[in-house]
Image (cartoon, grey):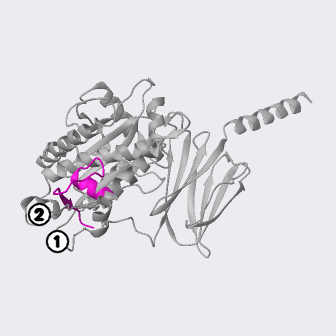
Amino acid sequence: MKKTYSLLVLFIAFVMSAASFAADVRDVRLWRAPDHTRVVFDLSRPADYQVFQLNDPERLVVDIQKTNLKKLPSNLDFQDTPVSRMRHGVRNGGDLRVVFDLSQQVKVRSFMLKASGELHDRLVIDFHEKEKQARTVKKAVDITSDRRPVVIAIDAGHGGEDPGAIGPGRLYEKHVVLEIAKELQRLFNTTKGYKAELVRTGDYYVGLRQRRDIARKMQADLFVSVHADAFTNAKASGSSVYALSQRGATSASAAFLARTENDSDLVGGVSLSDKDDILAGVLTDLSMTASLDASLRIGSNVLSEMGQMSKLHSRRVEQAAFAVLKSPDIPSILVETGFISNPGEAKNLATNWYRAKMARAIFNGIDNHFKRSPPPDTYLAALKRGEIKPREYTISSGDTLSEIAARFDVTVTQLQRENKLAHTQIRVGQTLKIPES
C-alpha cells in the first residue's frame, strides 16, 4: 500500500512538474505590412517549435512543444492577408498545434525572439505573398523640365511590435512620428522640385538595415528618421537632431539614445540572420565622409528651424553610432521631435497643430539646404543656375492673394511658402514668385 501511495505521489509530482515547465501563449498579435503579414505569439517562456506547409488546400502548420493556448484573441482581423482562418488544438497530450488556412501560396519565415525588457519570449511567423513584391520607387523625372526632383526618404521610427517610447495617457511614439512623417511628406510633395516617400506607411515594423535599403532603392538624396525622445527623468525636454558618428558619441545622452534606438530590432522583431553586418571598414570611405558632412549641414539647418518653434535639447547636431543612419552614400539625420516622456511635450505631440508645426520646421530646414546646395542633375539645381525661370506676377490694385492663387491654379499656402509671407496682406507693385501648380 505504501509503495502504491509513493508511486502515486511521484506521478502527481511529475505531472505538476511537467505542467510547470509548459509555456503559455499569453497573446497573439497580427501586423500587416505592404509585402507580408506577421503573426506574433507572446510566450511565457521559450519553446521548441516546427513549421511545415501543406497543399491542396494551402495550409501552414505550426507545432509548439509543451505549450498551452486557452483561446484565440477575438480581435484578430485577417482581412487583406493571405490567411483566411486560424485554428488550434492539442497534439501529443501537451503540444500546441496551430493551423493557418491560406488563400494563396506564401513564402514563410519564422524565428524566436528572446525576452527583452518588458517583452516576453516571442515566436514570429511571417507570411510573404509571392504575388506581392516589396515596394519599389521609380526614378522620378520632371517631364516639364527634364530634371529630376530631390528625393527624400522619410522614416517614421519604430512601428508594429515596437511602440517606441510611451508617454502619458499611453501616447505611443510610433503613432506620433508616423503622423509627423505623413505631414512632412505632404509638404515636400506639394513643393516643386521634391519627391518624398515614406519608409514605413503603416503600423508595422521595418528592420533598421531594411530602412536604409528602402532609402537606397528610392535613390534618395536624404534619409530623415523621425522620432520622439524619452528619458527616465520626466523633466527632460527639447528637440534635437542627430547624425552618425565615425568615432564615439558626442555626449552621454547621444550614446544613451543610440543604444536605445539600436535595440529596436530586438523589440520590433528581426531574426538573427538579418542582423547588421555592414560597415566594418566602410566608415573610412570617402563616400561616407562626404555624406556625413552633408548630414551635419542639413542637420544644422533643421535644428535652426526647430529652434524657432520649440525648445532645443541641444543647440548642436549630436552624433552617435545610430544603426539606422549607417548609409555610406546617403546623407542621413535622425530628428527627435521632443520628449514624449515629458508631460508638457507629450501634450503638444498629441495635437495635430503641433505635429504640423514640427513637420513644417523640419521641411524648412531641409528645403533651405537643398535650395543652396542642390544635387547637380535636379530641378532645383537648374533653377539655381538660371536655366529655369520661375513664374512671377506683379500685384496690381484690387488684387488679393486668393484671387492670384486661383488664377495660377495654386493654393494660398503655396504662395505664402514660396514668398515667405507670414500673412495674406500684399501691396501694389510687389512681385510674387508663382510656384508650379
Q: How many residues crowd mark 1 within 10 Å: few (<14), some (14–19), many (20+)? A: few
Q: Kindly indicate whether the residue at mark 1 contacts the one at mark 2 (C-beta within 8 angstroms).
A: yes
In this rendering, is residue 344 above or below 243? Answer: above
At horizontal 65% and vertical 54% (from top left) the residue drawn is 75
At horizontal 30% and vertical 44% (from top left) the residue drawn is 361
In this rendering, is residue 263 above or below 128? Answer: above
Task: Name the image quarter holding the C terminus.
Answer: bottom left
At horizontal 67% and vertical 41% (from top left) the residue drawn is 22
Mark on residue 382?
Answer: 2
Give the quarter of the image for residue 317.
top left
On the picture, is 90 further left or further right than 252? Answer: right
Q: How many residues crowd mark 2 within 10 Å: few (<14), some (14–19), many (20+)? A: some
Q: Could you tell me residue 388's position as x and y percent?
A: 11, 66
Q: Could you tell me residue 21's position as x and y percent?
A: 66, 37
In this view of the protein, which residue sits in the foreground, 16 or 252? 252
In this rendering, is residue 210 above or below 315? Answer: below
Give the quarter of the image for residue 137.
bottom left
Task: Specify whether residue 369 is painted magenta.
Answer: no
In this view of the protein, which residue sits in the foreground, 426 or 373? 426
On the picture, is 3 further left or further right than 410? Answer: right
In this rendering, is residue 67 above or below 434? Answer: above
In this view of the protein, which residue sits in the foreground, 125 or 309? 309
Looking at numbered disc 2 in the image, what kind of residue is underneath it?
Answer: Ala
At horizontal 79% and vertical 36% (from top left) the residue drawn is 11
**Callout 2: SS:** helix
Which residues are drawn in magenta?
413-437
Looking at numbered disc 1 in the image, what kind of residue is underneath it?
Answer: Ser
Residue 276 visible, this angle: no
Q: Could you tell me residue 323's position as x and y percent?
A: 31, 43
In the picture of the structure, the residue carrying the numbered disc 1 is: 145
